Image: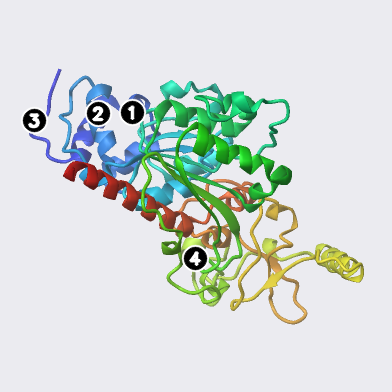
Amino acid sequence: MANYPDLQTPSTRLSEITALHGTPEVAKRMGTSRRTIERWVSGETRIPTHAVLAFDSAFGGLIPPGEPDREADITFIDLFAGIGGIRLGLESAGARCTFTSEWDKFAVRTYEANHDSAHRIVGDIREVDPADVPDHSVLAAGFPCQPFSLAGVSKKNSLGRKHGFLDPTQGTLFFNVAAILAEKRPRAFLLENVKNLLNHDGGNTFRVIRNVLEKDLGYTLHYRVVDANGFVPQHRERIILVGFRDGGDFDWDRIRPIAPAGSVTMDDVLHAENGPEPSAAPYVNPETGQVADKYVLSDRLWAYLQAYAAKHRAAGNGFGYGTVGRESTSRTLSARYHKDGSEILVRRGHGENPRRLTPRECARLMGFDDSFVIPVSDTQAYRQFGNSVAVPVMRAVAAQITTVLKSSAAERLAS
């Protein structure tokens, strides 16, 4: 079998391997997509060090391992990953993803189009033995909120005992998060959920979660409801839970946007519509920059939304559509946006029907760069961005987490 001692760069080494074995075989052995291999070979994207180190096992020693990446010594797993918004935050802080779980096939399509991984995406975390999850520094999860109750569970069995969380959380997806924390004991976790988690089931749901994380599993918990307004031009309140196995100086006050709330506006999100915008196709005409007609509300739908809003105003309710201009901050983008877009409609001038945001504008509203690929239908894209995290918020939180972890590691080395 040949070997390549003279090869100097990972992309060159991978190119030689691909020439020998073919892209499909390389992708199969590396547990990633053919498109990812093509990007690595062409130099379009940097080959992660963990992938370079995986070449040896994948190809029987054909490729000598490269030097370890000292900047990526914090690893994380991405559970209920969606389209990878939390991952982008942690990677911006120098962390490296080693495991991903996401069950929705459309979200997986978007995830794979945007994130290079040497590991396959696991569909259902409930089918994974926690012992089979790779060791990691940080567990990240945008876990769904499911109801569970302490009713019928004795305090003796549910609190203060090792693995006591099994009783009150069994059957919920939070159980899977807790089971992995118990088995792998990562140094930290980053969890995200809707702000109503605090009051769900009269506060009982959050009480159980807090007991599990603090009392059963022994983590130091920090939590806060954070509004993304200022990071992005959107009121979007989400609860973020950060925990550390060994404690640490985590400070929520350091997690704030550079610009004050209100100074980041929809002008940063909306298509300019005043000239060519080739990168925004197919959502706009690439030559004129005008948003495609299909995003403009029909006369029938616009009449219905106005009548619906008038009806609820008369009844003293606050239900109805919301419109924005370039100077505005929007309401919360939801996963139901694909139905009628009523919570965020873009004004188009007097006498003109408003329009929905395009999927690219939704991506920007959530803090995704324009390089983020949208490979799915508009309906799926609206659902995905409506369910996503605000990426700049995750970047700020991840920076604090990695600062704490690096500080505590430095203290251990110095002692």
Number of numbered tags placed on the structure image: 4
Distance (Cα) linking label 1 and label 2: 7 Å
| Above/below status of 282 relative to 197 | below
Q: Determine which residue is flagged by label 3.
A: 5
Q: Determine which residue is flagged by label 4.
A: 231
Badge 4 amino acid: Phe
Q: Determine which residue is flagged by label 1.
A: 30
- The mark that comes first in sequence, 2 or 4, is 2
Q: Residue at x 38, y 50 (%)?
A: 401
Q: Are marks 2 and 4 in contact (CB under 8 Å)?
A: no
- The mark that comes first in sequence, 2 or 3, is 3
Q: Quadrant of residue 342?
A: bottom right
Q: Is residue 130 visible?
A: yes
Q: Are marks 2 and 3 in contact (CB under 8 Å)?
A: no
Badge 2 amino acid: Phe
The percent position of residue 413, horizontal first and vertical second, equals: 19, 42
